[in-house]
Structures are given as structure tokens and as C-alpha cells.
Image (cartoon, helix red, strand yellow):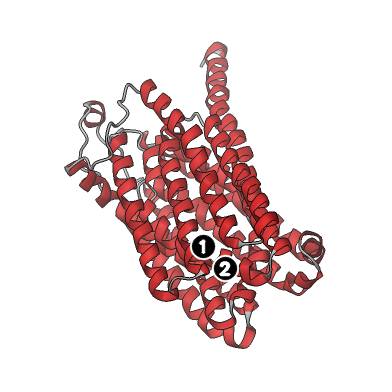
Amino acid sequence: MTLSSISASRVRVVQSGRPIARNFASMFIGNGLYSLSQIGFIVLLARTTNSTQLGMFAFALAFTAPVILFATMQLPVLLATDAQRRFRFVTYLSLGVLLYLAAILFIGGLSARLQGFSIPMVVVLLIGLSKAIDATSQILYATRQRQERMVGVGVGRALNGLSSLAGAVIAALVTHSVVWVSVATACGSALALALVAVPLSRRALRAEKSVWPGQLGPAGPETARLARLAFPLGCVSGILAMNGALPTLVIQDRLGYASVGAFAAVAYLILAPTTLTSALSTAAAPRLAKLHIADRPGVFRLAMFMLLAVFTGIGLAITAVAWLAGPALLHLIYHAGYGHMSSVFVVLALGLTINLMGSALGCGMTAARVLRVQVLIAGATLAVTSVLSLLLVGPLGIIGVAWATVGGYVVLFFGAWIAIVPERGRGQHSPLPATEASSGRRPDAQA
């Protein structure tokens, strides 16, 4: 190999890394501001209302998350990693909108049946509406993510979080009501959808010479094929969301809304550092998918293990901060009444570390289209968390539920490891033949 060819190879490597670095920086800033705004909601409610209203808000987040995430079916991720363009954008959007409308109806009906017409029911419905709007925006953003151009996506996330928090501050100071704070979250989501997500998607589709859909109706057999492909991921998302929401639901059932508020105040403190992992996953997913399509298992494994190492380091750093400075942080951000939750803070940070390790492997599984086994892993995770929560909440209280989440995430990590690492080593997931990938046909996607 000549010196000039070596230099050219190095230049190509550096240039190929620039989009990832730029996308990571954009998503880190955008997701960072969004995550800080979510923590801001918790701090705002803790300081302007009482633990009961804070508990209602946290309960609404936990109640709606499994339904919305199941309805999402990870369609944004599938679109962003659809390197072979197997499905049209209109198919992703049509299926998503139909599922989100069904999710809102389900959330409203179930909440009304369980709680009647009450303040908690109204808060649940408003939060569900907000999350459904966010999910629609994510499908639109995925058109840019697939092109590895995510600067505007970060702007949209930041606008969503900051506008929602600004409205919530005004609502909380004027009304001291969790209902109007929830209204502010929905308004911020709608603002980001209209001002950023829709224009970005239209621009991305013009670049791909695709047509913006004139209507949001289903696209026939193609929609059915996409639904079959996405359904396992919908189950995974819903089950894992239920796993994350289960501690809040158990605490509310056994200990009441005030205890939910105390638990949420601690749990949401570990959201801000996960902005880094979310940005990394968003930036890395399209590249992992392209490595899979190129049938480069060695490079694929290396990239996935690098992501795993970074995620593990972030989780351990968060755990160290919780261990060394947990009481001081709780006192500084909230007030002295939350100091007794420092041990819960440490346990939740440990659980987060293990969860992040599993998430890194899950990113690789989705990029490689190893989908159906994820349902089994998520189901086992939920089963372990459920059993441990019910067993430990009585004798140990809130910290018992925190330890239950750790047990569930251990199952998640080892299940993901067994599912993806041996498969990648054997290189069993081959790309489509070149003739099929380049012919423009959209064959049935296999999970």
C-alpha cells in the first residue's frame, strides 16, 4: 500500500467520523436541555405545590409511558435505520398516527374507569396527549436522523423542553395546580411539532425526492408488513416501560401519592446524565445499521462494545456521585425533607448503570434487526421486577422497590448479551443480496 493510499484512507476515516461527532453534539445539547426541563418540572412541583400533586404528575408519567411506548413500536428507530428504504415515509407516519390516536383513547378510557372524573384522570390524559405529540415528532425527526443530519432535531428537542418548562413555571406560580402544569407540557410539545419537526421532515423528504403525504391514511399491505416488523419492538418498548413504571405504580398502590412524589424526586435526578447516552444512541444507530448491511461483523462488534464501554462508564460515574454527594444534592435541589432518600438514590443509580449496559446492547440488536428475542428478554425483566417489588415493598418500603428494579435490569443485561454477542460472532445476520437492495423493491421485512 502506498503512502498516498494510506493518507487517503485516514482522511476518509476522519471524514466519516465527523457526522457522528456533529450529530452527537447536537443531540447532546438538545436532549440535555429537554432532560433538564423534565427535571425542572419535578423541582418546580416540589417547591410550588405539595408531594401529593408531585405524586400525581409522576403517576401520570408512569401510567401513560407503557401505552405510548407500545404504540410507538420504535417506529422512529426503524425509520432511521432503514438503510435499504424498505418502507416509504408515509407508511411509518400513517401507522404511527393511527397507533397514537388509539393509545390516547385507551389511556382516557382506562383512567376514567379506574379513577373516575378526577384531577389525576385529567393529568393522565394531558400527559398522554403530550407524549403522543412527542412520539409523532420523533417519526418526523427520524427522516433527518436517517440522513445523519441531526442539528435541527436537537433544536426541536430543546424548544420542546424549554417552552414547556417556561409555560409550567407561569402556570405553577399563578395557579399552584398540577393540571395547568400538565397543560403546559402539551403546549410545548405541540409548538415543537409545528415549528421544527414538520419543516425538518419536509426538507429531508425533498432531499430524498419523496413526496410529503397529502393524507394520513393507511398504506395498505405495506402498512401491514411494517406493523408485523415493528410489533415485537412495540412489545419490548411497552414491557420495558412497564418495568420502569412498575415501581411508581406499586408505591402509589401501597404507600400513596405522597410517597410517589418522594420517589420521583430522587428518580428524576438521574435523568440528566442519561442525556449523554441518548445522544450517543441516536448518533450511532444509523452507522451500526450500515455496518450490519455491509456485512462487517467484526467492525459491528467493535462499535457496539465501544458504545457499551462508554455507557458503563457513565453509569458508574452517576453511581459514584450518588454515593458521595447524594444527601447534599437532595438538600440543595429540594429541601431537607428529602435527605432520607439518599440511599434510594444510590440504589437507583446502580440500577441505571446496569440498564444502560443493556440499552447499549439493545441498540445493536435493533440495528441488526434481532427483534423477536427482545420480547422474551423484556418479559423476563418485567416478571423479575414485578415479583421482587411485591415481595420487598412491604418489609423495606421504597428502597425495596428500588432494589427490585436492579434485579430486573440484571436480567435485561444478561439476556441482551446472550442474544446479540454470540450471533454477531457467528455473523449469521447477512444483508440482503445486492440485486434485491438495489432494485427498488420493498420485500417483506423479516424480524
Count of number-bearing discs: 2
Outermost residue, left side: 221
Outermost residue, bottom side: 395
Vertical placement of residue 144 versus 76, above or below: above
x and y percentages locating residue 111 in the rendered image? 42, 69
Position of 58 with respect to 140 (left or right) is: right
Outermost residue, front side: 174
Residue annotated with mark 1: 123
Q: Tell me the quarter of the picture where residue 144 sits.
A: top left
At label 2, counting other C-alpha atoms closer than 10 Å, the crowd grade (few under 14, some 14-19, many 20 or more) is many
Residue under the image location 60 percent in, 56 percent down? 181
Outermost residue, top side: 4
The amino acid pointed to by label 1 is Val
Residue under the image location 52 percent in, 21 percent down? 12
x and y percentages locating residue 241 in the rendered image? 46, 62
Between disc 1 and disc 2, whose residue precedes?
Answer: 2
Q: Is residue 314 visible?
A: no
Vertical placement of residue 330 versus 225, above or below: below
x and y percentages locating residue 288 in the rendered image? 45, 39
Residue annotated with mark 2: 56
Q: Tell me the quarter of the picture where residue 297 sits.
A: top left
The amino acid pointed to by label 2 is Met
Q: Secondary structure at mark 1?
A: helix
At label 1, counting other C-alpha atoms closer than 10 Å, the crowd grade (few under 14, some 14-19, many 20 or more) is many
Q: Is residue 300 visible?
A: yes
Q: CA distance from mark 1 to mark 2?
A: 7 Å
x and y percentages locating residue 406 in the rendered image? 57, 70
Proximity of marks 1 and 2: CB atoms separated by less than 8 Å: yes
Residue under the image location 64 percent in, 38 percent down? 29
